[in-house]
Image: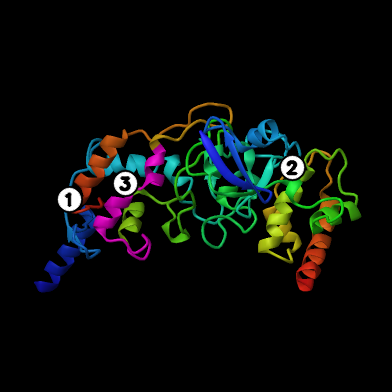
């Protein structure tokens, strides 16, 4: 099956079995290794990407659902010269330890900030339910608040 | 004498239950004395509607339940303002419009929680039936619309195609076949939507 979608701003088309999880299309066919396989059960959140702005677990998202959608992965969030506020905050607080789960956390956080620009601790706890086995949650919470500030000031400049 | 007849009528209604008409107006109440058996339409219908595949998403509160043991949904998932989760953690973060057999995540069109007024968890069969027939607790549906919802809505009928869990084990469907359930719902409604006494 051919599936066409926008990936990190670029028109993209893939041909694969329609049930293939988006995660494996991203990693194996499109060579975008930033999105990670964790549990494969939509439980840990390591595979989180954004589909039309909503955080989605790509391990449980058949590629056929991607037709016509706007997909954003960690590679499309920002870059070294122009990091996304979430990426900048993550660096400011040196959040990652092993780092494996962090792309998923950052994609979930970036999606949350678009809908809840100034999340409270409770908002963070209830919306960001990814799993970090290194236990970086405390630094992550600080970074999310910082990312919200950066995101708001960035929006004010626009 | 009239007073005695009135009291007798009340007792009859209390003893034998209430019935609803298949008209557009709900509820219309008349006393009946329909016998309840293991094979009668009401029992067959309720064997389905009280099953975990239905009740898990009709919780008495803001937390969905899941699994064969109806435990609270993992990850602290909550109802949210539109019965579809929170801003950053919607139902569609994990659930799509069909089951995903790779991850074991169930899915169907319009996957969401039933509105809080439609809670069934903790209710008896007759209480669920009265709730379904109450326009204030059934989304404003008349009986025809209720039957349509119960027998045609894809999210309801997902119960018979619940897919596998994350271990690859098939989820348990309701104890009555889909065909028999649909037949029972229609027969129950056409016979006046009788709700037996407790």
Q: In the rendered structure, the residue with mark 1 lies on which chain?
A: B
Q: 10 Å neighbourhood of mark 3: few (<14), some, or many (≥20)? A: few
Q: Quadrant of the N terminus of chain B?
A: bottom left
Q: Check disc 1 and report its element: helix, strand or loop.
A: helix
Q: Check disc 3 and report its element: helix, strand or loop.
A: helix
- Identify the residue under disc 3: B152
Please name whichever residue, A139 or B77, is drawn nearer the observer in this view of the structure. Answer: A139
Left or right: residue A109 versus residue B189 is right
Q: CA distance from mark 1 to mark 2?
A: 51 Å
Please name whichever residue, A33 or B188, is drawn nearer the observer in this view of the structure. Answer: A33
Percent x, y of residue A65: 53, 43
As drawn, the label of residue A131 is: 2
- Magenta segment: B135-159
Q: Earlier in the sequence, mark 1 or mark 3?
A: 3
Look at the numbered discs 1 and 2 and tell me whether their residues touch, using CB distance below 8 Å: no
As drawn, the label of residue B190 is: 1
Residue B198 visible within the image: no
Please name whichever residue, B4 or B24, is drawn nearer the observer in this view of the structure. Answer: B24
Percent x, y of residue B180: 26, 36
């Amino acid at each position: 099956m051919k599936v066409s979608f926008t990936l990190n701003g670029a028109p993209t088309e893939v041909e694969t079995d329609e049930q293939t999880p988006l995660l494996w299309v991203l990693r194996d066919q499109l060579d975008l290794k930033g999105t990670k396989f964790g549990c494969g059960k939509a439980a840990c959140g390591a595979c989180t990407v954004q589909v039309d702005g909503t955080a989605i677990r790509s391990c449980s998202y058949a590629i056929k659902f991607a037709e016509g959608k706007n997909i954003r992965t960690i590679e499309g969030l920002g870059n070294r010269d122009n990091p996304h506020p979430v990426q900048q905050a993550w660096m400011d607080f040196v959040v990652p330890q092993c780092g494996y789960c962090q792309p998923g956390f950052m994609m979930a956080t970036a999606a949350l900030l678009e809908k809840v620009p100034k999340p409270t601790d409770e908002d963070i706890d209830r919306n960001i339910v990814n799993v970090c086995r290194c236990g970086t949650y405390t630094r992550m919470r600080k970074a999310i608040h910082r990312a919200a500030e950066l995101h708001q000031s960035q929006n004010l400049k626009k | 004498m009239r007073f005695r007849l009135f009291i007798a009528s009340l007792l009859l209604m209390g003893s034998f239950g209430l019935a609803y008409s298949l008209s557009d107006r709900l509820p219309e109440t008349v006393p009946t004395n329909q016998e309840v058996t293991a094979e009668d339409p009401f029992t067959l219908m309720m064997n389905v509607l009280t099953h975990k595949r239905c009740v898990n998403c009709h919780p008495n509160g803001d937390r969905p339940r899941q699994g064969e043991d109806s435990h609270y949904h993992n990850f602290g998932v909550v109802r949210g303002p539109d019965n579809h989760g929170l801003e950053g953690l919607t139902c569609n973060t994990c659930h799509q419009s069909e089951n995903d057999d790779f991850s074991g995540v169930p899915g169907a069109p319009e996957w969401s929680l039933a509105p809080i007024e439609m809670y069934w968890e903790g209710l008896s069969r007759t209480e669920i039936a009265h709730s379904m027939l109450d326009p204030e607790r059934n989304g404003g549906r008349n009986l025809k619309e209720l039957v349509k919802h119960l027998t045609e809505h894809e999210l309801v009928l997902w119960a018979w195609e619940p897919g596998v869990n994350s271990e690859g084990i098939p989820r348990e469907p309701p104890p009555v076949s889909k065909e028999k359930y649909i037949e029972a719902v229609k027969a129950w409604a056409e016979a006046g939507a009788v709700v037996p006494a407790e």
